[in-house]
Structure formats: structure tokens, C-alpha cells
Amino acid sequence: MTNSSGINNNHSSDENLELTVDNGINSWVDQGFTWLIYLFATITVAILFVMSWVIYKEAKPAIEQFGWGFLWGQDWDTGNQVFGALPYIYGTLVSSAIAILFAIPIGIAIAIVTSENFLPISVRITLAFVVELIAAIPSVIIGLWGIFVFIPVLEPLQKWLAIYFNWIPLFNSVDPIGTNMLTAGIVLAIMILPTMAAISRDVLLAIPKELRSASMALGSTRWETIFRVLLPAGFSGIVSAAMLALGRALGETMAVTLVIGNSSQISASLLDPAYTIPSILANEFAEAEPGLHIGSLSYLGLILFGLTLAVNIAARLLVRWFSNKNKS
């Protein structure tokens, strides 16, 4: 009995020692992983600040020369060293707004169709894959497709709008030729659609099935369940998808450069050529002269960075406001 009890006590103490060692190792692993994540996050933020500082140093001559007046200046004269950003800010914001207005409803519709049981699962998976495949197409290819395929199809519609709806400022243009703000906005919408649709679909699929079942059990139709339960439940994720898509639209370069017309004149008509910040950076930076020209282009880069940052902050505030509203 004594030997047996002693052996049992030894086994117990050995097991306790092993558990203590295992817990200690797991604790060190957890702490090490936590510090590794902090390190990567710090490196990411540091890289962002370094990039901003480098661009600021390049933009400093233009900042000192033009100040805040650069934001609403409309002249871009490299010969006289006079530069203004307003036409490019306007073109960037309007083309991105057109893109997101098209992409949000179409992307949510695709997300609903591919996440709910409207179609056989094989069809839904194929449709989702095809939409996501658009994201793999290089932007210059989409731009060339826009020039040779999309513009010839869209141009007759734009001419018709200019003839019969010229009393509306948005369509008041003389003989539109296809390379304009509206075309750029639609091409951008096609480019950001995979981002909007794929993330929204993942959000809807992540919603617990119990919410669907409970809503249907209370007598709601499928569409009432979608619009009154699923979409409000996934609102924060859908907003995040929209902001991510908008961020890509703000920074898109080659596709927009090929189809927007590259005119620095501000026009209320969507059928007139325009210009964006990424487009002018792509067209002029390689041949820009040191001094105010490169400084002004870098200043535009800072403005684009600020616009993207403002969009993300606005999205965060919107999601927080909606969450607080639901709690109250």
C-alpha cells in the first residue's frame, strides 16, 4: 500500500510538473506571438510615416510657394511655373463617386444572389468566381478594353443624352466622343465591383443562420429577411467593403488615364473630358523638371493620400454611429 501510494504520488507530481512546464511554454509562445504582431504593426505604421515624410519633402517647394491656395487653383502651366490642384481633385472625386454609385447596388445584388438560395450552389459558386476573376485583370487591359470595346458601345448613348437631355447640366455637352468622366466612372465601377461583391458576400455568409430561421419563423418573407435582418446585420462589413472599393477607385491610374480624356478643364457635364490625380501623376512625373513641377506633383500625391485617409475615417465614424444607434 505504501509503495503503491508513493508511486501514485510520484506520478501526480510528475504530471503536475509537466502541466506547469506546458503552461509556461504556452504562455511564452502567446507573449512572443503578441509581441511579433505588435512589431509588424509598428513596422507598417513606420513605413507609412516614412512614405509620407518622403513625399512631403518632395512637395515642400510647392507647399511653400502656393500654400493652401494650391487646393483651389485651376491653372497648370509648366512654362510659367503656375500650378493648381482643383481640376484634378474634382476629377478624382467625381469619377470615384460615379464608380461607387454603380458598384454598391450591383455588388450587394451579386452578394445576395451568390449567398442566398436563389440559384443552385454550382451556379452561385461559378458566378462568384467569375466576378472575383475581374480583379485579376490588369488595369491597363481594362483600359484598352474600354477604348476599343466599351467606348464604341457607350458613345451612341452619350450622344443621345447630349441631344435630348442637354437641359440637364450633367449631360450638357457638345458632341461627346466617349472619353469622358462618365466612361471613366463606369470603367472604375467595373474594376472595383469584385471588391464590393466578394467582401459583401463573405459578410452575408458569416451572419448566423439562426437569424434567417428566426425571421422566417416569425412570418417574414425572404426579401423582408434580406432587407430587414441580413443587410442591417452586415451593415458594418458592407460599409467596409464600400470604403475599400472607394479607396481603390481613388487611386486607380492606367484604366482611368486611357478613358477619361485628360483635360484639366472643370465641367459640370459628365460627358466632357476630365483629369484625375493619379492620371496626371502617371502622365507627367517621369518628365517633370525638378523644383516646383515635381513639388506640385508630390503635393497632389499628399492630397490623394489625405483624401484616402479621410474616406477611411468617415467610414469608421459611420460604422460607429450606426452601431451606437442600434444599441440605443
Image: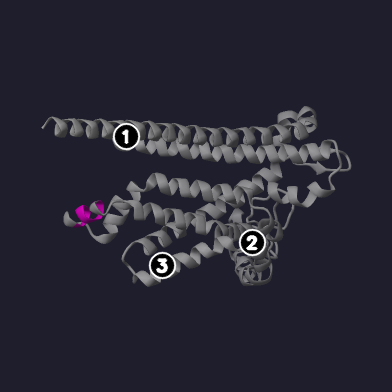
Disc 1 crowd, CA 10 A, few/some/many (<14, 14-19, 20+): few
Are circles 1 and 2 on residues that touch, CB within 8 Å? no
In the image: residue 8, left or right of residue 64: left
Compared with 234, 32 (above or below) is above
**Separation (CA) of disc 3 from disc 1:** 48 Å
Q: Which mark is residue 125?
A: 3
Name the residue type under label 2: Pro
Query: Magenta stretch mostly in which secondary structure?
Result: helix
- Please tell me whether mark 2 sits on a helix, a strand or a loop: loop
Q: Which residues are magenta?
A: 211-216
Of labels 1 and 2, earlier in sequence is 1
Does the segment drawn in magenta span residue 81? no
The label number, if any, that marks residue 138 in the structure image: 2
Disc nearest the viewer among 3 and 1: 1
Q: Which residue is mark 1?
A: 18
The image quadrant of residue 98 is bottom right
- Specify the amino acid type for callout 3: Ile
Residue 312, x across and y down, in percent: 52, 39
Few, some or many residues within 10 Å of mark 3 (<14, 14–19, 20+): few
SS assignment at label 1:
helix
Q: Residue type at mark 1? A: Glu
Q: Position of residue 125 (x, y in %)?
A: 41, 67
Look at the image and tell me in which quarter the C terminus lies. Answer: top left
Quick one: 49 or 142, which is closer to the camera? Answer: 49
Q: Position of residue 162 (x, y in %)?
A: 63, 63
